[in-house]
Image (spheres, grey):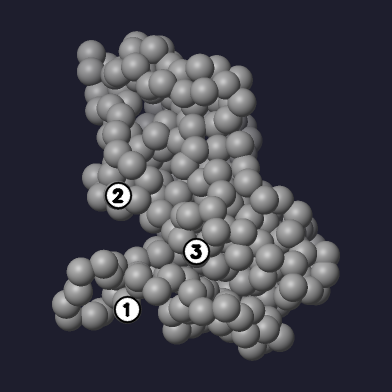
Amino acid sequence: MIHRVTAEALYSPEALPAFCRATVDGFAVRAADTFGASDSLPAYLDVAGEVLMGQEARDPVPAAGAVLIHTGGMLPPGADAVVMVEHTQRVDERTIEVLKPVAPGENVLEVGEDVEQGALILPAGHTIQPQDIGALLALGMTADLPVRKRPLVSLFSTGDELIPSDAPALRPGQIRDINSGTIQALCQRAGARTQLNPLVSDAPGALLAALEAALPGADMLVVTAGSSVSARDLTAETFNRLGAPGVLVHGVAARPGKPTILAVVDGKPVVGLPGNPVSAMVMFTLFGVPAIAGLMGAEAPAQRRVPARVSANVPSAAGREDYVPVRLVERDGEPWAEPVFGKSNLIFTLVGSSGLLRVPMNVTGLREGAWGEVVLF
């Protein structure tokens, strides 16, 4: 169930805790019997028994009495507080000194203090996290939960220069397909199922035929194509031929990844990514991952961002957002972002990087020492 998305709101079938219980080891008491107690003038209480763990506490605490209790134990009738054992001293087997007063409700969890019966636990469209699993188990909700179907993303890489990533050897002019595996990993982390398709050649009509075959069974199509103008135009033309409304965005104001294509066909998102690995990964993080969240009826995951000083001048051009791989280091107690400069077809610029330094759209770069924002991987 982890990272699945709830299909409907879930409500608590019971109160938690279901009974008043102690939060410390000590003695269950009537708080009024401890008022005014101090080291020099302790309150003397008679020990009337012990609450056994996992047992119902039925015997009430008498006036001027105390019952030994352990963390998580059920508060006995009549008690309204727990004195920590550190604030008591044994006089004999039947009597204790209380050296510090407690207020009503102190060191006690009341019925429903964690969650009340009928309260909303998880809203519809919530992505289930590990702590949610713990909360559901605490309420005995171990049966199958109503969750949304994981969307199926069908992945394509195109280009006559590509060979499968597990190919044993390269001939001159060939490169291994790495985009399919990288985008597949991003899809799976976002909660989607994936379908890796055979490599698509540059032959006329090959991409259209492959997409037409995959579209009925998929919830989303992703194509990584070559970076040449002709390859981009072919991909956009193919998306338009695939169905209506077709291409919505052809090119984005960002680097790397300007050639990105965003389309919708028969109500399904279709994404065209640049062939350069860094560009493909950055653009799919910005556009593909939120699309997957939308297909599951969930909010787009919040990107983890941290401020950091830039360790070198980072040039840019006004009118576009730049994303520069950086390593985060600490200097004199401050975070610094060290740019890992490289071209967008060099995947190893991302290996060892902590994230991407975002250069805002309407600036011409960041000077050394300036504060910037790093989007963490």
Is disc 2 surrounded by few (<14), some (14 to 19) or many (20+) residues within 10 Å?
some
Q: CA distance from mark 1 to mark 2?
A: 18 Å
- Residue found 43% across the figure and 17% down from its top: 366
Between 33 and 57, the one nearer to me in the picture: 57
- Residue found 33% across the figure and 42% down from its top: 343
Between 162 and 40, the one nearer to me in the picture: 162
Quadrant of the rendered image containing residue 293: bottom right
Given the image, on which type of amino acid does mark 2 rest?
A: Leu
226 vs 302: above or below: below
CB contact under 8 Å: marks 3 and 1:
no
- Which residue lies under the disc numbered 3? 225
Q: Secondary structure at mark 2?
A: loop
- Which residue lies under the disc numbered 2? 346
Which mark lies nearer to you, 3 or 1?
3
Q: Earlier in the sequence, mark 3 or mark 2?
A: 3
Q: Position of residue 180 (x, y in %)?
A: 42, 70
Q: What is the number of the mark on residue 164? A: 1
Between 94 and 77, the one nearer to me in the picture: 77
